[in-house]
Every structure is written in structure tokens, then in C-alpha cells.
Amino acid sequence: MSAPGMKDNVTVHGFSPSGNCHKVRLLLEQLGRPYTWVEVRSDIGATHSPEFLAINPNAKVPALVREDGAVLTESNAMLCWLADGTSFVPSDAWQRAQALSWMFFEQYSHEPYVAVARFISGWTPIDSPRRAELPRLRERAHAALAVMERHLASHDWFTGAHYGVADIALFAYTAVADEGGVSLASYPAINAWIERVRATPKFVALPDNDNEVRARIAASV
Amino acid sequence: MSAPGMKDNVTVHGFSPSGNCHKVRLLLEQLGRPYTWVEVRSDIGATHSPEFLAINPNAKVPALVREDGAVLTESNAMLCWLADGTSFVPSDAWQRAQALSWMFFEQYSHEPYVAVARFISGWTPIDSPRRAELPRLRERAHAALAVMERHLASHDWFTGAHYGVADIALFAYTAVADEGGVSLASYPAINAWIERVRATPKFVALPDNDNEVRARIAASV
């Protein structure tokens, strides 16, 4: 199978509060593509079960499985595959490379700080020693947001002329950065872009956090 | 400009001992494509000069500049652009996504451990406090290598049926992992793959480290 047929069902193994997992759900919803979601509690170690490691030996969600059993890992690779040939990926090679550049930026310079600060704040015990990492993570998160703000001062999107895969990749954790104690108050262009993303057709938000997670976040900021 | 024309010269701003930078040089050499290399001493902060920040506000090498001045950042995005339409990228969408998956794996689960352990070992002072990070970095590096070894037990390459961009991305730091104190002795499939990569047409190796770097590495392992 080459490009995904619209009739083919895919199964996504994912943890719903995870931005990396939500990226895939958001694109599937916006493409109007059928899919099955299998919840995997990565916050309590479910990605290290023998069953899950048989799907992804790297022990990470999300993992996408086709009807024929073939597996694709890495959220941003899933976005590229699912969006292949649609308006969510630029048709021009240079613009496509720019979108990929932002997606690699997201995974290297943004997610390890913005997402990890949020995870530690909301999904680890209040007395976790990992909380000592938060000041450094927040500092690096702001460095990544400054790079995004600079781009958005003269561009509407990260995927070229239109909304697409790089916007989905960067939106996922940026929109909930405050849950990791990373305030977006001083980034007007990012806030305007977040509103543009939320206004795209068939947009779906991350689920609300449960009370326990909310209490931990409130105690962390 | 869409796909790169073979006559167009590109300029790569890079630090020669960096694996991320060497990826781009290796592909350019193997494509037989003309390029200009501008050495940027990222090890002594040259990526934070006003001149360099005007090229890449994220203060990282490599940065690729076209003749018209347009800039592309992120080494793996450069590989995808330069290789677009060549045999270094799979023509099948699913295989292309698998190659991208390995490239995201490289930047998220491999480079931050394998490359950073090497950088700290060879390019920071012997009394640097960052050396306290080495045991954890080496442990995570081995976890990434185990995932690669498992794949290579039943595949020759990371880019599909042929050598290509994902192999170049993963080769860069894997081949010099020992410089970070990460031994490849227990990975026979990785060692065989390294030899296959070295045997590809027009292969070029990283430059030898200078005496000062070699002495620091010898003192670190």
C-alpha cells in the first residue's frame, strides 16, 4: 500500500492527554478519515508492556497500525503519511522542506521542554525529584517560543501559505504550554496563530484534564 | 524554486566535527552536487553571533542558504530537500514515512544522547560539571542503539529497500558513538550496517579529531 486510501481504517494507540498523540487525532478528524483509538496509559508505564513493545520497541505512543498490521511510529511521520497528497502538506519541495524543518524543530527544540514541563507538572507526584528540572525546562521552552513568535510576526502559518502538518505539530503542546508553567502572555503572534488554528474546519481540542492532574498543575506553577 | 537544480550552488554553514553538519556534507558529496562550506565554530559560541542569528534565530548549525538567500534549517529537513526525487528517498509514500520515522527517532531518541555524550566528552573542559550527565546519557544512548540493532536484524537499511536519507541521519553519530564512551561492541548488526554505509559510492568520513579533542575523549571513557 502506498498512499492511504480514505476507506482504510487505521488504529492509533495513544494516550489522550498527550499532545504527540493528539496531533494524529486532530489531523484524522480534519481529514474526515475513519480510525480506531486504543487508549494506552503511558503515564503509568503501559508502553513498557510486552504487548505494546511488540508494536513499538521504542516504548512510545502514538503508534499507528494499518489494517494489514504494518506499524508506523513517530507522530510527525504519521502526519506526513496521512496528509500525503492533501492540502495539509505543501506541494512545492522547498515549502515542504520548510514544514519538515519546523517539525524537526518541534521535536528537538520545543517538545523536550514545553511538553516535558507540562508532563512533570501534571502527571508526576507533587514531591517528584523531576520537579527540580522545571526552571531549566521553562527557560528553554521560552527560547523555542521566541523563535516561533519571530516567524509568526511575518507569516500566518508554519506549513507555507496554508494551515497544515507543521501547524498541527507545533500547536499540540504550544496551546497548553501554560499547564507546564510556561506563560504565553508575552507572545501576541503565537496567541493570534492559536486562534487561527482553533478556527480551522473540524478542529478538535485536547480533552480536559481530570481533577487530579488539574490539582497538580495548580500546585506547580 | 521548487526542487533543487543540480547547477544551483548551496552554502552550508556548519561545524565540521558535528555529525548533524556532516550529514549534509555526506549527501552533497554523494549527490555530486556543488556546494560552499562556511565553517562555524559552534563549540565556542559562534552560532550566537548577530551575523549567524540573522541566518538561524535558533542558533544552531547546520544552516543551508540558497543562491537567492533563502535559508533552510534542521539537518534532516535539508537531507529531504536535497534528496527529493532521487533514489536517496523512497518513492513509495509508506516507505517514505518509515524513513521519516527513523529521522524523527534520530533527533528525539538518539542524537540527544549519542551526540551529546560525544560532545561533552570531546568538546567541554575535563572539569566541566556537564560530565555528571554522562552516565545517564550513555544509558539512554544504548537504549536507542538497541532499537536500531533490532531493526537491522531483519533489514539492510533504514530508508526502505535502499541506502538513503534515514541511513545518513542515523550513521552520522552512530559511527562515532565510542567517542562519547558508548561502545558498539555488542551490536553486530549495527557494525555490519556501518560497513555497508562506508562502502557506498562517494562516501566521506568525518574529519579526524584534533589532538586536544582526542586527549579529552581519552580521559572521559
Image (tube, coloured by chain):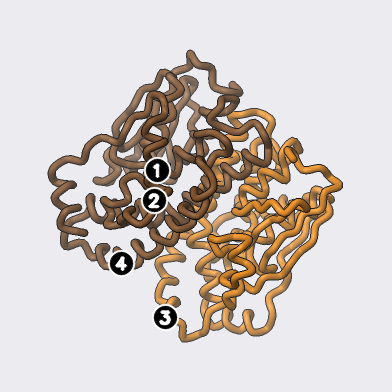
Chain colours: A orange, B brown
Q: Are marks 1 and 2 on the same chain?
A: yes
Chain of the residue displaying label 4: B
Chain of the residue displaying label 3: A
The three-letter code of the residue at mark 4 reads Pro
User: What residue is pinned by disc 2?
Assistant: B188
Chain of the residue displaying label 2: B
- Identify the residue at image location x=44%, y=77%: A131
As drawn, the label of residue B135 is 4
Q: Are marks 1 and 2 in contact (CB under 8 Å)?
A: yes
Nearest to the observer: residue B78 or residue B174: B174
Nearest to the observer: residue B91 or residue B136: B91
User: What residue is pinned by disc 1?
Assistant: B192
Q: Residue furthest right?
A: A7
Measured Cα–Cα span from mark 1 to mark 2: 6 Å
Q: Residue furthest top?
A: B7
Chain of the residue displaying label 1: B
- Identify the residue at image location x=44%, y=19%: B33
Residue count near mark 1 (Cα–Cα under 10 Å), binned few <14, some 14–19, many ≥20: few
Counting residues from the N terminus, which is met first, the one under dot 1 or under dot 4?
A: 4
Residue B49 drawn above or below residue A196: above
- Identify the residue at image location x=15%, y=57%: B219
Residue A103 horizontal/vertical position (percent) = 57, 47
Mark closer to the observer (3, 1): 1
The three-letter code of the residue at mark 1 reads Ala
Left or right for B117, reference A26 = left
| Element carrying mark 2 | helix
- Identify the residue at image location x=38%, y=57%: B113
User: What residue is pinned by disc 3?
Assistant: A129
Residue A195 horizontal/vertical position (percent) = 71, 54
Q: Are marks 3 and 1 on the same chain?
A: no
| Element carrying mark 3 | helix
